[in-house]
Image (cartoon, rainbow, N blue to C red):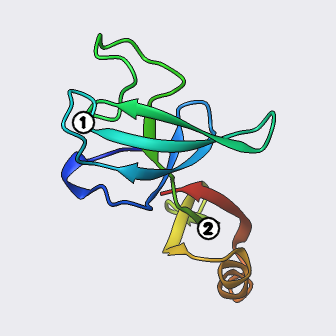
């Protein structure tokens, strides 16, 4: 999860709470100490509840973490793990990520299968 930047928040933007509930921004300019209003999907009844938050995305202003604090959702990507060798007789094995982050698992695997040292494709949060 990424911390929100108040100035970059937009109405309709997707957010997620600290405990993983999905939501969306309804308002960012309420004339109040808590100018952000979000609609959060309640998993118990599949309806939206509204919350007001401080500019830093926190539900409380005390510095205490709360399940209602909001963040930007993390993006997912895929990386390939390869075995590499070094040393005098290639006797030292280590693992590395090669070719960066792919947007889909299939795209990553298609690239990896060309390399005999391919071990595995894993999902990562960006």
**Quick one: SS at disc 2?**
strand
* Disc 2 to disc 1, C-alpha distance: 32 Å
Circle 2 or circle 1, nearest the eye: 1
**What residue does disc 2 label?**
78
Q: Is residue 110 left or right of residue 25?
A: right
N-terminal-most mark, 2 or 1: 1
Residue 88, position in %: x, y? Answer: 50, 62
Query: Is residue 1 positioned above or below 52 on the image?
Result: below
Judge by depth and name the residue closer to the eye, 63 or 25: 25
Number of the label disc, if any, that sits on residue 55: 1
**Quick one: SS at disc 1?**
loop
Quarter occupied by residue 79: bottom right
For the point 58% across and 41% down, the residue is 40
Q: Is residue 27 left or right of residue 38?
A: left
Q: Residues within 10 Å of mark 1 (few under 14, many from 20)?
A: some
Residue 22, position in %: x, y? Answer: 61, 47
């Amino acid at each position: 999860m990424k911390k929100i930047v108040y100035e970059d928040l937009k109405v309709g933007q997707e957010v997620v709470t600290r405990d993983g509930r999905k939501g969306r921004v309804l308002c960012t300019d309420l004339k109040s100490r808590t100018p952000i209003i979000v609609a959060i999907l309640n998993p118990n009844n599949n309806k939206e509840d509204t919350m007001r938050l401080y500019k830093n995305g926190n539900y409380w202003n005390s510095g205490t973490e709360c399940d209602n604090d909001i963040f930007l959702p993390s993006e997912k990507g895929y990386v390939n793990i390869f075995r590499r060798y070094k040393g005098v007789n290639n006797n030292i094995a280590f693992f590395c990520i090669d070719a960066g982050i792919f947007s889909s698992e299939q795209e990553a695997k298609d690239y990896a299968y060309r390399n005999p040292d391919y071990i595995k494709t894993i999902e990562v949060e960006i």
